[in-house]
Amino acid sequence: MADKDSPDVSRRKFLGFAGAATATAVAGCTDGGGTDTEQPGGGDTDTPTDEPTEPEGTPTERPEPETRDGYLQRANWHAHDQAPWVFLHQQYSVYGQSNDIEWQPRSDERVDAYAIEPATDSGDDVVMTQSQMDSGLDPQDHRETPTDNIVLQAYEGLLERDREGAIIEMLATDYQRLDETTVQFTIRDNVSFHSGDSLTPEDVAYSINRIVDDSVGFTSPQSDQLVGVEGAEVASSGDRTVNVNLSGLNPIVFQSFATYCDVMNKSWVQNHDSAYINQNMEGTGPFKLANYEQGVEVEFTRNNDYWQDEAAISTFTITSASESSTRVNRLLSGEADIIVNIPPQEVGRVNDNDGTTVSAVPSTRVIFNAMRYDVEPFDSAEFRRAINYAIDIESIVQNVLQTFGDPSSQPTLPNFFGHNEDLDPYPQDQARAEELVEASGYAGAEIELVTPIGRYLKDVEVAQAVAAQVDELSNVSATARQVEFSTLVSQVTTGNIEDKPPWYLLGWGNATFDAIQTLQPLLASDGSLTSYKNDEFDALLDEAQSLPSESS
């Protein structure tokens, strides 16, 4: 283990001199709330099975959950026990920034240029270099944060979260639940799209339906981000109200709309094809698209007709570099004002440079290795548990991430609603791992971990460490293979599990602070990004979504 007081940069030392806000935003969420689980271990059966097994040394029966929180905690217990992932860590977002600007990072990884202010005369034209560019400019046709950080400059939703995590009104001035299956939004007046067209309730209803209803003529990969939303309709044009129809109670509907569903101009979308929509922008936001070179650069200029106060900066340009050293060099040379994912070994260089600083914040992103339940050897719960026991995640956090991360035990992060605080990360136990491999019937397996390049903090190095530790087992061989992030995204977002690699590293950000928005899309049988299928797990999620949320 690395000594936190060694000359190497540690998170504790870094946070001391960076002066960054590091508390994760948790407004609207609670932690704990009536755990219905027992302390899990790594129990196995004599034959491979995906049926839940009792952990070693625990009672054979657990009480049925009585609350939504309890069902979500039970679902996290199930995930820990059945191990559809190699559970890795909560990511820290580590940014470098120029002293020419004033800006503070958010835990949800959103970089909102509207929140940037010039600190000097040079801070009026801001450049951000992220690890990847976008997959297109259609705000409803992507699932990745680099594209989010581009489209959010021009597009807005009905609700939003502030930096502290509280829900605030944006294009909606009011929202309320009418009954168990209907909620209503009142749409803001005197808001214009960048073309000059006025925002109408029809635009809002169309935008919701475009995401959740294939019959609109578009299949959005974001449909499960509005889980439980069946459609929308204008309730009253005069009152500017839109009713949203739900399949059931949907306890997190307002949290979902505070995170997802950018509003688009209905007539503009209907009058243009997909290629045009993916290369142009027609939003209501504080910045207008000035220039777009796909894969290279996106340039925005200030929207002088914005419905709120004008942005403090004049232009915002986004570029990318997958190599962290390139991003750091751009910051130090003055070519960039904000860069993402500074590796720990570069923190000192950025902070020692005159005119640049580093900021970090625990993010809402969990990093994991998904294992497809439908392919050998990952169809065995014993084998999947074995891979978890093979990993020394504490060592990876200490020595690879240099403490810029926190080990995880389950899909849901701490301080999220539904997090199970009784679960601990799998301890490294290679003897136990080898026993489980033998019990699985897959001794001698050769497995390959696919990892993106430069998308997440030290992603390649983390994947290489995982593969090396698994390869130390006497009865499993493991390697890591690097691919471009765009390649991996194209494989995992098709909606077909068969298109995904058998074993891959991915990160998932959840800005709703609710477990369902991680468990549903990534692990439910019908999740658009799922690598897992289990009826008992699905039933736990269904029960959770049928109950009111105890979070405020």
Image (cartoon, grey):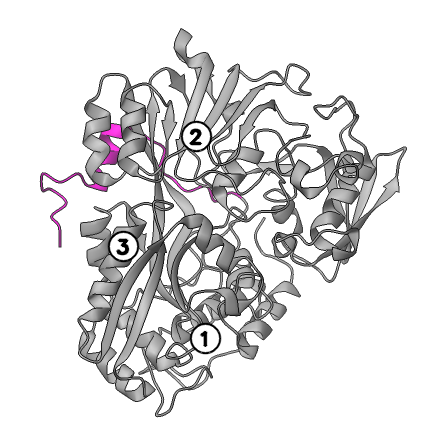
Q: Position of residue 441 (x, y in %)?
A: 32, 88
Tell me what residue is drawn at x 78 percent, y 38 percent: 266
Q: Is residue 498 left or right of residue 210?
A: left
Marks 2 and 1, how far apart at CA: 37 Å
| Kind of residue at disc 1 | Tyr
- Give 386 or 140, whichever is nearer the viewer: 140
Marks 3 and 2, how far apart at CA: 25 Å
Is residue 188 part of the magenta span, yes or no?
no
Marks 3 and 1, how far apart at CA: 22 Å
Q: Position of residue 317 (x, y in %)?
A: 48, 24
Q: Secondary structure at mark 1?
A: loop
Residue highlighted by disc 2? 319
Question: Magenta stretch mostly in which secondary structure?
Answer: loop
Magenta-drawn segment: 1-27
Tell me what residue is drawn at x 76 percent, y 52 percent: 217
Residue highlighted by disc 3? 462
Q: Residue furthest top?
A: 121
Q: Is residue 548 left or right of residue 293?
A: right
- Residue 373 has which mark? 1
Q: Secondary structure at mark 2?
A: strand
Q: Against 229, is 455 above or below?
A: above
Circle nearer the N terminus (2, 1): 2
| Kind of residue at disc 3 | Val
Q: Secondary structure at mark 3?
A: helix
For label 3, the crowd category at 10 Å Cα-Cα, with few meaning under 14, some 14 to 19 and many 20 or more, is many
